[in-house]
Image (cartoon, rainbow, N blue to C red):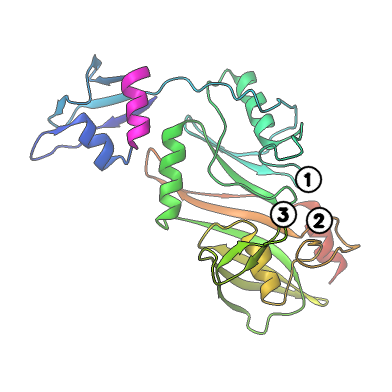
Amino acid sequence: MLEWNVPLVKNTISVKEFLRDQKGMSLTTLKAAKMHGSILCDGRHVTVRHMLQGGETLKVFLPAAPFPSAITLCSEPLDILFEDAHLLIVNKPPGISTLPGREQEKVTLAGAVLNYYRQQNISSSFHAVSRLDRQTSGVVAVAKHAYAHQRLASFFQAGKGDKQYIGVVKGRWKQPEGIIDAPIARSPNSIIEHQVHPAGKRAKTGYQVIKNIHGSDVTSFTLYTGRTHQIRVHAAYAGHPLIGDSLYGETSFHINRHALHAEMLHFCHPVFESWHTVYAKLPDDIEQLIMEKQ
């Protein structure tokens, strides 16, 4: 359920205008609420044409989400960083995909979340607002309904939020901090690999060196856009691939995956419009890598 106190207005506005213009609700979500859910104003059922004076309590009940049969439930434990009626934010471990891929993995973050929903009697589908590569660990935001998904995604697209990662790269950056602004496209000879290419979509990554260790830099990365493999591609393009990145660099005997972790998410709540920050602790394998290379 979504609930708002309608602010006082000079001129009356319709429920549709309030939800579309002031709360950013998409036409698809509004239609779903109208056709298969319900809208209440001060406890009375109303239509989207109902005029609001200001001061009312508006409640929107969205239809129950269908269970995604393509996703297999799994008992992978969840490290929950934040949860309310609208969002679930978790710390994804390395080695599991966010969603089933071409290999139709049986253990995925989606399967673990849906299993948790079933145990907690939460009626929701899986709406990943942010995704991580299989071997990237850290913060993943999951919306519990379509409105939260759409609104939070639009906030990120509008720059209302920050995503920061910690990575260990090969070699030393020439400058301790900077911006890599280079377009990224899919590599023509691979269904997985991406590359910097003039015909690609704009991609912008900020970096800042946190610590110098033997032959490497522990680096904080900030994503300003959200392209596939963005940090991995940009780091390799700059001549500093992530340690252990076999796709864009080379394997390492220090760690059996690429050394990248989504450490922090600073976001504007999609319903309450309050600001929150969540942190995911650096995993043991990256901590061990840093200790071994000091």
Quarter occupied by the N terminus? top left
Relative side of 37 to 165, left or right: left
Query: Up-down: is 37 above or below 282?
Result: above
According to the picture, the residue beneath numbered tag 3 turns out to be 282
Relative side of 101 to 164, left or right: right
According to the picture, the residue beneath numbered tag 2 turns out to be 257
Instruction: Measuring from the top left, give residue 35's x and y in whole percent.
Output: 33, 19
Query: Up-down: is 58 above or below 211?
Result: above
Q: Nearer the viewer, residue 2 or 192?
A: 192
Tell me how far mark 1 sits from mark 2, CA to CA: 8 Å
Q: Residue at 10% of width from left, 34% of height from top? A: 12
Secondary structure that dominates the magenta span: helix
Residue 136 falls within the magenta-colored stretch: no
Q: Residue at 25% of width from left, 16% of height from top? A: 43
Q: Residue furthest left?
A: 11
Q: Give the class, few, some or many, for how many residues have Cα within 10 Å of label 1's Cα (few <14, many ≥20).
A: some
Q: Looking at numbered disc 1 in the image, what kind of residue is underneath it?
A: Gly
Q: Looking at numbered disc 2 in the image, what kind of residue is underneath it?
A: Arg
On residue 95, which mark appears? 1
Marks 2/3 in contact by CB < 8 Å: the verdict is no
Tell me how far mark 2 sits from mark 3, CA to CA: 14 Å
Q: Residue furthest front?
A: 189
Q: Residue at 72% of width from left, 57% of height from top? A: 190
Instruction: Measuring from the top left, give residue 129's x and y in whole percent.
Output: 53, 43
Q: Looking at numbered disc 3 in the image, what kind of residue is underneath it?
A: Leu
Query: Which segment did they paint magenta?
Result: 26-36
Marks 1/2 in contact by CB < 8 Å: the verdict is yes
Which badge, 2 or 3, is on the more N-terminal residue?
2
Instruction: Measuring from the top left, give residue 164's x and y in whole percent.
Output: 58, 59
On residue 148, which mark appears? none
Q: Residue at 43% of width from left, 54% of height from top? A: 157
